[in-house]
Structure formats: structure tokens, C-alpha cells
Image (tube, rainbow, N blue to C red):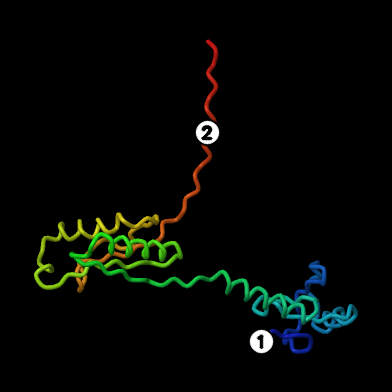
Amino acid sequence: MDTTRVNHNIRAKEVRVVGAEGENLGVLALSDAIARAQEIGLDLIEISPNAVPPVAKIMEYGKFQYEAQKKRREIKAKSHVTETKSVQVKIGTGDHDMQLKARRAAEWLAEGHRVKVDLFLWGRYKYMEFNFLKERLERFLKLIPEDYKLADPIQKSPKGLATVLERAKKIQAAPAPSPAKPQAE
């Protein structure tokens, strides 16, 4: 629902008016501001109702609605929802399967998602030495071809060991300094 007030729906007694070309017309009584807008054949639109005095702009209402809708579309297009995807590895997972899972995790990281990696333990595996299990999980992490950082450190979880990965921010390389010319002695 559009709550923008236009012309006679504006409730303030006086408003700060911005002209059609963006020029500041100063603080005017509401009736004077509406009269100025109607002289040009445009509308008086309240664009900042919480300011003291409220700010109103002289422009065509249809154009105002179009620009607002365009801004909403741009914001929606730029927003990116990230999910946490999961990859589960077991102690006995073969090398080829680990490579496939690592490639899939890399794809998710490239898309901007977080990836939770679980080393699933069952039975007697739950009681194995923590460092051995941690090394096994790190071996899987080394297979991931995408750059990443650990969002959560490797720790025990109800299923075994778990960590969360995030895509590493790409850092632009600083331009290399030009080689210094040798000075003649």
C-alpha cells in the first residue's frame, strides 16, 4: 500500500519545497506550495514526512511512483539469500567420492553459500582420538578447490566433527612497485 501523501492530502501547515529541477524553494505554506505545483501542471509530493518541516517535491506523481518501483526492483535484484548447505563425509569415504563432494562444496562456495562439513562418526569411531579425526576432516578440506575461510573452527558435534566454511573475500592485489632504476655511481 502506498502511503505517500500528495497535494491536499499533506497534513503539515508548511513544507520545505524542492522544485521540479531539484532547486530548493525554501519553506512555504502548504497552500502556496500546492499553487506553485499546479501552475506548472505538476503535483506536490511529500517525500520526507518525518522531517521538521516535512519535505515535499514538485513533480509528476506517476514519475515518482515509477522511480520508487525501480528502486525497489534494484534492491531486490541486489539482495542475495545465502543458505547453509551440508556435506557429510565418513571415515571410510573413498577418495573419488571425497573429490566429488569437495567439488560440490566448491560450487556452493562460489555461489556465495556457507557450507557445513560434517565428519559423520558412528559406533566405535566416536571414541577415536580427536586429533586423528580432525586430521581426517582437514584432509577433506584440502580437496576443496575454491578459496574459503573457516567460519567456525573444527569442533565436536552430535554427529561427530563439524565445521562451517565461507567463501574467502577476493582481495585485489596491490599494483606491483616499478623496479627501481640503478643509479650510476
Q: How many marks?
A: 2
What is the quadrant of the N terminus in the image? bottom right
In percent of width and height, residue 77 lies at: 58, 72
Q: 175 left or right of 7?
A: left
Characterize the local packing of mark 2: few (<14), some (14-19) or many (20 or more) Cα atoms within 10 angstroms.
few
The quadrant holding residue 93 is bottom left
Q: Is residue 173 above or below residue 104?
A: above
Direction from residue 163 to residue 44 in the image, left or right: right
Rendering coords of residue 120 (x, y %): 21, 70
Residue corresponding to mark 2: 177
Across and down, in percent, residue 144 comes to 34, 57
Q: Which mark is residue 66?
A: none
Q: Residue at x 78, y 74 (%)?
A: 17
Q: Residue furthest top?
A: 185
| Farthest right residue in view | 39
Q: Residue at x 72, y 87 (%)?
A: 11
Looking at numbered disc 2 in the image, what kind of residue is underneath it?
Pro
Q: Residue furthest front?
A: 96
Q: Kindly identify the amino acid type of the residue bearing the numbered disc 1.
A: Thr
Q: Residue 51, percent across and down?
A: 66, 75
Where is 16 relative to 184, above or below?
below
Give the residue displayed 41% in from the left and 60% down from the top.
167
Q: Nearer the viewer, mark 2 or mark 1?
A: 2
Q: Nearer the N terminus, badge 2 or badge 1?
A: 1
Camera-side residue of 155 and 99? 99
Q: Secondary structure at mark 2?
A: loop
Provide the residue designation for mark 1: 3
Q: Is residue 44 left or right of residue 73?
A: right
Say what secondary structure mark 1 lies in: loop
In this rendered view, identify the residue nearer to me: 21 or 86: 86
Front-lying residue, 25 or 160: 160
Q: Residues within 10 Å of mark 1 (few under 14, many from 20)?
A: few
